[in-house]
Each structure stands twice: as structure tokens, then as C-alpha cells.
Amino acid sequence: MKIFRLPMLVAVLCMAVVLPQTAAAQTYPNKTITLVVPFAAGGPTDMVGRVVAQSMGVALGQTVVVENRAGAGGTLASAYVARASADGYTLLLHHIGMSTAPGLYRKLAFDPLKDFEYIGQLADVPMTLIGRPDLPAKTPQDLIAYLKRENTKVNLSHAGLGAASQLCGMLLQQAVGAEVTTVPFQGTAPALTALIGGQVDVMCDQTAQTVPHIKAGKVKLYAVTTAQRLKALPDAPTLREVGLKDFEVVVWHGLYAPKGTPAPVLNRLNAAMRDALKDPALVKRLDEVGVRVVQESLQTPDGLRNHLREEVERWGALIRKAGTYAD
Ligand code: ASP
């Protein structure tokens, strides 16, 4: 008899843990879900977040609200979600910054490779190199010469260490061989306002925000950061075309949940995310601003986890070379 007691106890304990989770997963979601966006409202990540939240809400039959938790280049929001309840009601939408943060911060309050469950990759967002409306540089070549000549007199705005705009700005300085003065903001929404107002000179920002402003003539467009030209901005050359060899920054996005979120909940979220990414209204809205939904094989937990791991390594090496750190 005795031999059976321990396994039985283990079985009962396992059921005690698993049953409530299964029950919760069966009724999931029965209240509003919060999608945390790690940058300021009105910016490009916010734009992608709101479009995805809307379509996922329809797929889940529940409201998905966006909560902006800006600060420290997206790392405050990541740390917040890493510590949130693992019940599927707090999620994180983050981008390439999830993979640059471990290289950029000597101390990080979360581990991108250990503290999350991975739901899937969503979309790739190109970047644009833009300038204030009255910047004298007319062409991308003029701009490169201006950066080299004026160096620290040039103000380049970005959204903090860990933001895509900071990564792009850092790579731009390396590629051009210039050292500019960088001005951090809580997101590229306020950074763009400063650029339009002429308080800063240049910035890299994602098309999800910049396309309408470029088309309205509010900022000067110099180039795009992708390897190929963009359908949304066909006249803009790539930075490669203007002589910055191998330059490419594409801002990939992923959907995360806190570590320990039950598998049935994660499956439900992944299915809803994939449904949302097929929504023609979402595809059209994103396509208009140069955003491309990723291929289906990447819309998976492995598609996100593996890419994140590779990117942490890739950017870690490049950041060490650039010597950019925050304590
Ligand atoms: N995408 C960020 C924002 O929404 C900023 C960045 O990553 O550069 O503000």
C-alpha cells in the first residue's frame, strides 16, 4: 500500500495545481486584457499596438486595452510585465529593443530570455531617416556631409537606450563616422514633435509614425533603413544606396506574456493573434504605413523565441563594439 501513497499524493497535488488553471483557461478571457506598450502614446509602437489590440479583441470576444508604460527605452514596461500575474490578462507588445536591452544595460530588472512566455512575432516595421523641416541638407549625401562636419553640434533625438530610434542612430553614427549629440525622449511621438518644431535636427523613426508626416511635408525625408526601397515611400533611397554599406534596421515585433502563463491561455492568445494578423482591415492599415505582417511560420512561440535569442547575440556583439552602455 505504502508504495502507492507517494505517487497518489503527487497526483492529487498536480491536479490541485492543474485543475484551477484548466478551469481558468476554459473561461479565459472573461475580463478586459491589458496590452502594455513600452513607449509613449501616439508613437509607432502604440500605433501597431492599438491596431493589433483592436483585432485581437474581436478574435477573443473581449476588450483589449492598450496601456502606455514609457521610460528607459522600453525596459520599464518589460520589467513590469515580467512581474505581472501570469494569467493572460497582462501582455507586452515589444520590438527589437527586447534584444538590444541586455547589451545596452549593465543592470536589467528582467531577463528577456527567461522571464517571459513567447506568443509569436507580429510585424516588421521599417525606419526612415528624417530631419527638421528647415534643415539645410537637401539630399542624403548632404546630410551625411553635415553630420561629419558638425558632429556634436547636431542633435539627434531618440526614445531612450533600447529604442529602435536609438539603435538606428547609433548604427548611423558608426556608419558615417560622426559623433552627434543624442537627445532622449519617452517615445518617438514626443521626439517627432520636437523635430517638427525644430528643437532637434535629425532622427530615425518607424514608418508607422512617419509616413503621414512625410507625405504632409512636415519633416524632411532622407532615406529608408531597409535593404530595399519601400512601396509606401517609393522615391526614398535606402541608406545602402547612398553609400552606407550593409546598413539595415528593420523593427521586428513580438507578443509576450509573463513566465508561467498557462499553456491553454497562451494557445488561445496565439490563435487570436494569428486571426488578427489575417484581418484585412489590419493588413491594409499597416500596409499603408509600410508595415508588413510576418510570415505565418514566425507567428509562433518558437518563431519569436528563436529570433529573440539570435538577435540578443547579434546586437550584443555590435553594442559591445560601439561601447554604448547605461548603468
Ligand atoms: N517605437 C518607439 C515609440 O513608439 C520608439 C523607438 O523604438 O524608437 O516611440
Image: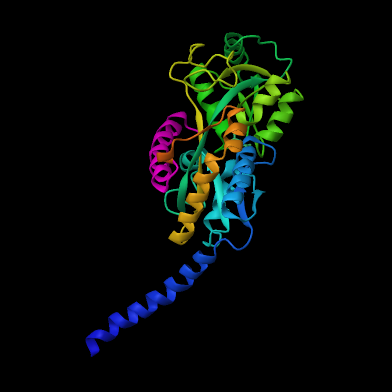
Q: Residue at x 50, y 29 (%)?
A: 250
Quarter-of-image position of residue 282: top right
Up-down: is 159 above or below 69? Answer: above
Q: Which residues are magenta?
A: 299-327
The answer to whether residue 133 of the structure is visible from this angle is: yes
Q: Main secondary structure of the magenta part?
A: helix
Q: Nearer the viewer, residue 45 or 199?
A: 45
Q: Find residue 283 and report its horizontal and vertical position in percent.
A: 57, 34
Residue closest to the far right = 197
Q: Nearer the viewer, residue 168 or 61?
A: 61
Q: Report if residue 314 lies within the magenta region.
A: yes
Up-down: is 297 above or below 9? Answer: above
Q: Find residue 69 and report its horizontal and vertical position in percent.
A: 64, 48
Q: Residue at x 63, y 35 (%)?
A: 44
Ligand 1 image position (quadrant): top right
Q: Nearer the viewer, residue 63 or 118?
A: 63
Q: Report if residue 186 lies within the magenta region.
A: no
The answer to whether residue 108 of the structure is visible from this angle is: no
